[in-house]
Amino acid sequence: MAELSKTDEPQDATPNVSEVDVVDARTEEEAVHAIEAPVERGEPILQVRNLKKHFPLTQGILFKRQIGAVKAVDGVSFDLHQGETLGIVGESGCGKSTVAKLLMNLERATAGEIFYKGQDITKLSGRALKAVRRNIQMVFQDPYTSLNPRMTVGDIIGEPFDIHPEVAPKGDRRRKVQELLDVVGLNPEYINRYPHQFSGGQRQRIGIARGLALNPEIIICDEPVSALDVSVQAQVINLMERLQDEFNLSYIFIAHDLSIVRHISDRVGVMYLGKIAEIGSDEQIYEHPTHPYTQALLSAVPVPDPEAREDRERIILTGDVPSPANPPSGCSFRTRCWKAQDRCASEAPLLAIPERFKGADSPAAHESACHFAEEKDVVHAA
Amino acid sequence: MTTIEEVVPVPSPRDGGTDGTPLLEVRDLHVEFHTREGVVKAVNGVNYSVNAGETLAVLGESGSGKSVTAQAIMGILDMPPAKIPQGEIRFRGQDMLTMSGEDRRKIRGQRIAMIFQDALSSLNPVLSVGYQLGEMFRVHQGLSKKEAKAKAIELMDRVKIPAAAARVNDYPHQFSGGMRQRIMIAMALALEPELIIADEPTTALDVTVQAQVMDLLAELQREYNMGLILITHDLGVVADVADKIAVMYAGRIVERAPVHELYKRPAHPYTRGLLDSIPRLDQKGQELYAIKGLPPNLLRVPSGCAFNPRCPKAQDVCRTQVPDLLPVTEQDGTELVGRASACHFWKETIHG
């Protein structure tokens, strides 16, 4: 059984976050073995527990001293199940991209654990870490800067094979790359072209092909379509859904476009200032939001239907997101919340099913980090 | 024989609309760029008009020519490489393309103003926002520095920047994205123009801030009875604020319609495709409708209708003949006010 926390701070009591079966691998051999074991559909594959990333703020040149920290991610817990898509939404600066980097192990977490098949990847090294990295891949936001302009498409997609030669033996690589191009809907004859010869949508397909090269189990997509034209976005979303079925992938889908997130996700987490404000199935979040921030976010999204504009209730938040270097006491949303009371300033709400909905067989019974959680149907408010 | 060149003064602001001339009218505008690879025809015969107090949304993907049209109206195109071989841009009946530079300068900023997309790169990082806002008054109205600063504070209050008097000497980097966009709006509003062109004013902003900024813009527009040209690719924003819409594709307007009509019954396959590719609730788990193919390269625009390689309805005639932007009618022939479509098969598209 895992000791979930080492700090004395109150922990989020998220009931649908199941307990972690920690695999106690004593040797590297055992660790690699555990990582390569298959996971059944619907079982948790990635379990994040109280994850934190604080970037230190320092002062002075010779004698640097820390004067504070930007709390980019401040206690995030969630599960990703095999074969599902978990959407993460939030405004810029809420820490969603930092979460992605932590999951990729590109940043070292300040505290907390990330269990991949029962192994804490923040503590792995050597061959075990390499095996994990093979199984968790990433698709980046900007297809114009995430592809090396001096490499051909074949080199870009084939580069993962240089690092993990066991996936494709040397003589086989060109054929493998052509297969991948075909899978993402590009002409296999384009293998010797350079990125600048492709449009944005095609480049994003190259990025996806690179992510698929090593047959990963999890793909983390950080705003994969936001840089694309509207008419091309749907093509890429369809491709990603098709690949998920075909290769049995689990996605973490980070985006700010709420309608696209709803379309592709099974579950959605809403982040605000480094914390998860609300998490639940797509229906629970979109139809029965209980956290005021989620409600404000949903009501602010322009609906592509002019009939709705007169009678739609809109919650317009005042002000901007506070600085994560100096977040408000208690609930971090209270400075912009219309429901805020004294209690919100003194006591940080935990992410849990609100007391009043506990045990109720209602879609409102999902985790929400608010003292005054209340259902409000903003999408259909008419 | 002597001819006296008639001097027609541009009519004074805010009395317009009575004589039927629109505030701004773009007629058959062409813009091309001469590059080493050839001539890029960015705008090929665009027509639209805006009245005072009205919001026209210009909808299109990148490369459709929507921003180039706006820059041509403002007169801020780099010429060369850009060239305007043909067309008229009439502001209160006067063609701005044939005007002297001096006359044009009097209109720009004072009577037509523009809000740019990226507020951080459109503001000068080494000058305080108060100085940049005050510049409008110093240059156009000849106010002193002190007076201009007082006006700047007033403007910042107007666009609801908290503690305006204390922040007037701050620099752009000290403001958040939403606040910077407010400063851009304040700058555009400074001289109470009759027309504002907003080029993707909220694309770089978060949704909650986008809602604030769009609300502010709508409020100020009502207050001053301004015309607004909103350039965007976001179908949601358009549905929220526009009165009428012009959809652009490959440098041409392919459809024009009042906002409610367009969403209810699109008359061009491209518009229909865009509307169909919005994820809808009942389509969860199904494949999204996607327009196949890619936007065309403007160096090699397809012959005939530029949309034909991507169009599900394309026939032989679409590959040879460029469809004109023609009025759209009901099935019984009654005219639909303000509607037009550039498709050979608009009848099938709207009524089919």
Image (cartoon, rainbow, N blue to C red):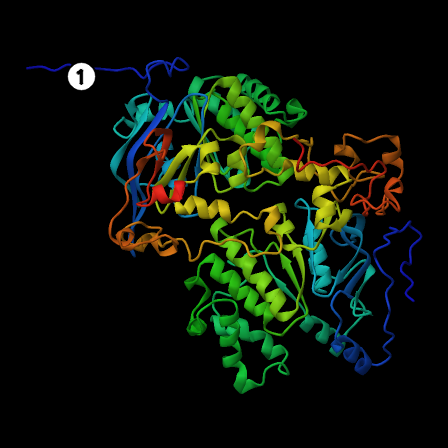
**Tag 1 subunit:** B
Q: Is residue A337 above or below residue B307?
A: above
Q: Nearer the viewer, residue A66 or B304?
A: B304
A251 relative position to B32: left or right: right
Name, please, the residue furthest toward the front: B332
A25 relative position to B4: left or right: right
Q: Residue A243's x, y, as percent?
A: 59, 66
> Which residue corresponds to the image point at 46% horizontal and 64% vertical from the top-left?
A195
Q: Residue A43's x, y, as percent?
A: 78, 66
Q: Nearer the viewer, residue B252 or A52?
A: B252
In which image quadrant can residue B171 be found? top right
B310 relative position to A375: left or right: left
Name, please, the residue furthest toward the right: A8
Q: Is residue A367 above or below residue A188?
A: above
Q: Residue B302's x, y, as percent?
A: 30, 54
Label 1 crowding class (10 Å Cα cut-off): few <14, some 14-19, many 20+?
few
Residue that mark 1 sits on: B5
Q: Secondary structure at mark 1?
A: loop
> Which residue corresponds to the image point at 51% horizontal and 74% vertical from the top-left?
A155
Q: Is residue A97 above or below residue B152?
A: below
Asked whether residue B175 appears in the rendered view, the answer is no
